[in-house]
Image (cartoon, grey):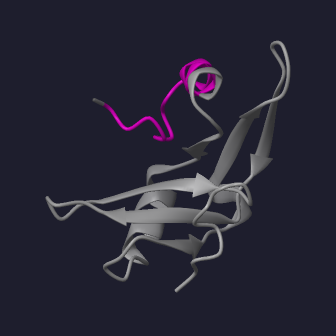
Amino acid sequence: EKDPHAHNRPMKKVKDRVRKNKPQGKWNSKEATQNAANKNKGTVHAVEIEPEDGVVVTHKERQDFDIIEADRAITIPKANGEIHTFPIDLSHPQYNTLQ
């Protein structure tokens, strides 16, 4: 499966995930994704990102969505050595886990 937070993922697909799940992060560039992954220290934790690096999409009511600039991302080490990462906002439980 392709990364659901990738910069080239159509916003419609991101919004579809928001409807089914919860707020979703979306990167604005591949470089931003890699920059966040490079800040990982071997555990699950948040890292600071530049406001232009990514957004968080939230569902309001009916068909309305909020799209806000993110200032942090979660970084999650995977067993294969890759780092899964996506922009987050204050509602994410790992928001205050900066290292």
Picture coordinates of residue 61 (x, y %)? 85, 20
Which one is nearer the viewer's eye here, 35 or 16? 16
Membership of 16 in magenta stretch: yes
Tell which residue pokes out farthest to the top in this image: 62
Residue at 63% across, 28% down: 18
Tell which residue pokes out farthest to the bottom in this image: 99
- Image-quadrant location for residue 94: bottom right
* Residue 49 as seen in the image, left or right of residue 3: right
Picture coordinates of residue 74 (x, y %)? 51, 63
Q: Is residue 31 above or below residue 14?
A: below
* Residue 13 as seen in the image, left or right of residue 84: right
Residue at 83% across, 13% down: 62
Q: Quadrant of the N terminus?
A: top left
Tell which residue pokes out farthest to the front in this image: 93
Which one is nearer the viewer's eye here, 10 or 82? 82
Q: Which residues are magenta?
A: 2-17
The total number of labels drawn is 0
Picture coordinates of residue 45 (x, y %)? 48, 73
- Image-quadrant location for residue 90: bottom right
* Residue 5 as seen in the image, left or right of residue 21: left
Q: Is residue 94 above or below residue 6?
A: below
Residue at 36% across, 83% down: 41
Residue at 64% across, 67% down: 95
Membership of 73 in magenta stretch: no
